[in-house]
Amino acid sequence: MIRPERPDDADAIHDLTVIAFDPMPFSDGTEAPIVRALRAAGDLTVSLVDEEDGEIIGHVAFSPVTIDGADVGWFGLGPISVRPDHQRRGVGSRLVAAGLDELRARGARGCALIGNPAVYGPMGFVGDDALTYRGLGDGLVQRVVLEGEPVDGELRFADAFEAYEDAHE
């Protein structure tokens, strides 16, 4: 069952995010603190959980982004966390789809992320290097247009997200 985060979910989401990213070689351990920082800053625009038998098995976060310093109605996807024993079963894809639907309902124009094109391409994301982020290439900066025209330029995530990125460069 996918539903919006409730206030009493914060600790379970934190713990889930820690265990989901712990074995990932690309993780620097900042994912769980980023979710808390986004929530504290009021930038956790869409936060959905997937609940099974009363336990949270997945979580997805969406927060505002700017492109070339301007708010153009776009949002960033991430982090997305799925309990290890439920990974590769479509939980993440369902959470992303539900989150994008929620963003559309709110009038968002698009969504961007940093991630593996093989994972996010099937969800409709395109890494054409029109959006840039801190010099990343190879299609890692991806986007999906929800309404209107594609945008291009330098992507910047919410300040709470960026603070952790800056601290771990």
Image (cartoon, grey):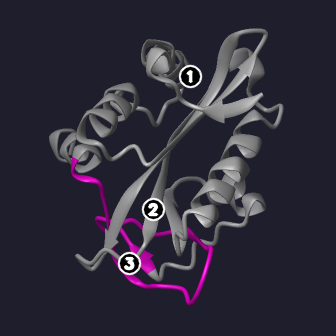
Q: How far apart are marks 2 and 1 (CA)?
A: 22 Å
Element assignment for label 3: loop
Magenta-drawn stretch contains 150: yes
Specify start and end residues of the magenta stretch as a single range. Answer: 131-159
Q: Position of residue 136 (x, y in %)?
A: 39, 65
Q: Name the residue under label 1.
A: 20
Element assignment for label 1: helix
Q: How far apart are marks 2 and 3 (CA)?
A: 9 Å
Q: Name the residue under label 2.
A: 75
Crowd rating for badge 3 (residues with CA inside 10 Å; few <14, some 14–19, many 20+): some
Q: Name the residue under label 3.
A: 72
Element assignment for label 2: strand
Q: Where is residue 165 in the image (x, y as percent from the top left)?
A: 25, 45
Amino acid under disc 1: Ala
Q: Which of 116 and 54 is in front in this view?
A: 54
Instruction: Classify 59 as above or below 103.
Output: above
